[in-house]
Amino acid sequence: MDSLVKPAPECEAGTKIQISVVVPVFNEEGNIPVLVGRLMDVLKGLSSSFEIIAVNDGSHDRSLEELAVEALAPPEPIAPQSYANASVSL
């Protein structure tokens, strides 16, 4: 597993994560910014703290790099996970 894991921060001091969205990713580089944007629009409209966990299943495109870009864009709580192709996104 690559070491591109960013733990999701607590949304506010003392607030626990209430919703975790797990997204399987395999060769989705062009869809990641759109997906994350739409997820953020929906999740921010809820009155719950949240995180997005994106699991990259050995993509051969730039999916992992796109996930890294999204994870570094504050204050988005995104935790990309990357594995050698193990069919975890089935």
Image (cartoon, rainbow, N blue to C red):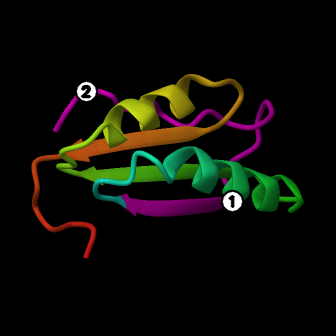
Q: Amino acid at mark 2?
A: Ser
- Please state if 61 lies on the left or on the right of 44 as rendered: left
Q: Residue at x 47, y 51 (%)?
A: 53
In terms of image quadrants, where is residue 35? bottom right
Q: Main secondary structure of the magenta part?
A: loop
Q: Disc 2 designates what residue? A: 3
Which image quarter holds the N terminus? top left
Residue 24's spot in the image, x, y percent? 37, 62
The residue that label 1 is drawn on is 18
Q: Is residue 7 magenta?
A: yes
Place residue 61 in its image quadrant.
top left
For the point 68% across and 58% down, the residue is 39
Q: Secondary structure at mark 2?
A: loop
In terms of image quadrants, where is residue 3? top left
Of tags 1 and 2, the one toward the viewer is 2
- Badge 1 vs badge 2, beta-carbon distance below 8 Å: no
Question: With respect to residue 87, does 1 lie above or below?
Answer: above
Nearer to me, 49 or 14: 49
Instruction: Give the camera-side residue of 35 and 46.
Output: 35
Inspect the image, locate mark 1, and give the three-letter code of the amino acid beneath it: Gln
- Numbered range of the magenta stretch: 1-24
